[in-house]
Image (cartoon, rainbow, N blue to C red):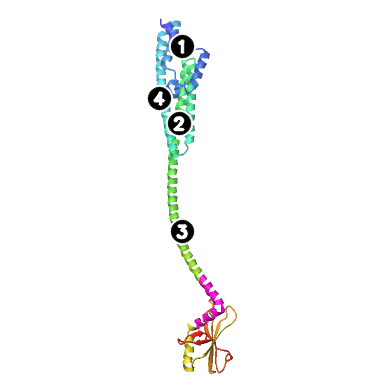
Amino acid sequence: MEEPDRREANGDATQDPNGQEEHEQADSSPENNPAVNDPTEGSPPIEALAKDAGSDGAAAEDAEGDQVGGKVADLERLRDRLEAKDRHIRELYEELAAASLAADEARTRAEAVGLHAGDLEEERVELKERLRAVEKEERKRWRRREGQDRRVARLEREIERREAEIERLQDLLEGRKSEIEAYEGEFQDTLSRKDVALADALRRVEGLQYDLEERENEVVELRATIDKLRAELDLEYELRRRIAEPANRLREGIDLFNGSEHLQTVNSISKSLGQPKVLVALETGDSSPVILTFVWEDITWRTYHANPGLAVREPRVYLESSGEGPTNVDGRPSNAHIGSDGRVILGL
């Protein structure tokens, strides 16, 4: 009664090649691949291995009845070894899951810093692809192996390779952590330097604003000065226009003489010799002076020059000549006189 059940179990384990190939293709897709979600589901169950071992033991017991006790003991030891291997494989998958989680954490930290995110993401994808490839290969190995010894040897080699891969991944993760820490330090240094540069720039901007305000004040002052100079220039143009007329130039020259100290000299002489004959004349030319001649009855005479031009240097009023006796202006009529206030007045 036990032998047909074992043969049925053995028959279920060995399918036709076409059916096995279709099953492998269905398992290769991400939706139908349980190893992607659970690392332990990619390995054949221990119970199936035990059934296979039991079916093989039953066949061997029917063939060689004298070796039943030894085969059963071997099968029990083999089952124990397979269970230990399966637990070890589960532990390796858990370590791989922890390594994958650590890689995800490293990727998250790298994204927070903004450095090497693409490399870590590609590495994580590569690890997932390699994990899928390894799991697919492992399933193929479990389907294709013909004997327990070869399956155990392959499993041991795969375990060694997985352990080496895990060690390499751990070393790689440690290296990535060190790189991330270094990049974080560089980022902090760069950030501090940028803060210092920003503070310097702000100070420079404040200084430039202060300079700009000073320049604006200078511009306002210069504009006021320009307006003042323009007003003075307009006044000077007006004075020049007035002085350019002979009558105005003559009056300006007389006013200039009345405001000088030479008027006191003329008044002092007039107190002793009487009122003089006054002759005022204007030479031709824009910058020519006004000539004032004072004659006291063929006793003495004095000639003064008064230049009302704005560009004339001091002294603008000065004694040009003087003498005793008659002068060459005696025959010319007087055209001015000294008023009661002692000032020269144009006209008689």
Label 2 sits on a secondary structure element that is helix
- Which residue appears at 46% of the width and 19% of the height? 152
Say whether disc 3 or disc 2 marks the residue closer to the N-terminus. 2
| Residue holding disc 2 | 169
Query: What amino acid type is highlighted by mark number 3?
Result: Leu
Mark 2 and mark 1: span between their CA atoms? 38 Å
Q: Which residues are magenta?
A: 234-257
Disc 2, disc 1: CB below 8 Å? no
Query: What amino acid type is highlighted by mark number 4?
Result: Glu
Disc 4, disc 2: CB below 8 Å? no
Secondary structure mostly seen in magenta is: helix
x and y, in percent, of residue 35 in the image: 45, 22
Is there any visible trace of residue 137 in the rendered image? no
Residue closest to the eye, 115 or 294? 294
Label 4 sits on a secondary structure element that is helix
Mark 4 and mark 1: span between their CA atoms? 29 Å
| Residue holding disc 4 | 91
Say whether disc 4 or disc 2 marks the residue closer to the N-terminus. 4
Label 1 sits on a secondary structure element that is helix
Q: Which mark is residue 212?
A: 3
| Residue holding disc 1 | 12
- Depicted 155 relative to depicted 189: above or below: above
Query: What amino acid type is highlighted by mark number 1?
Result: Asp
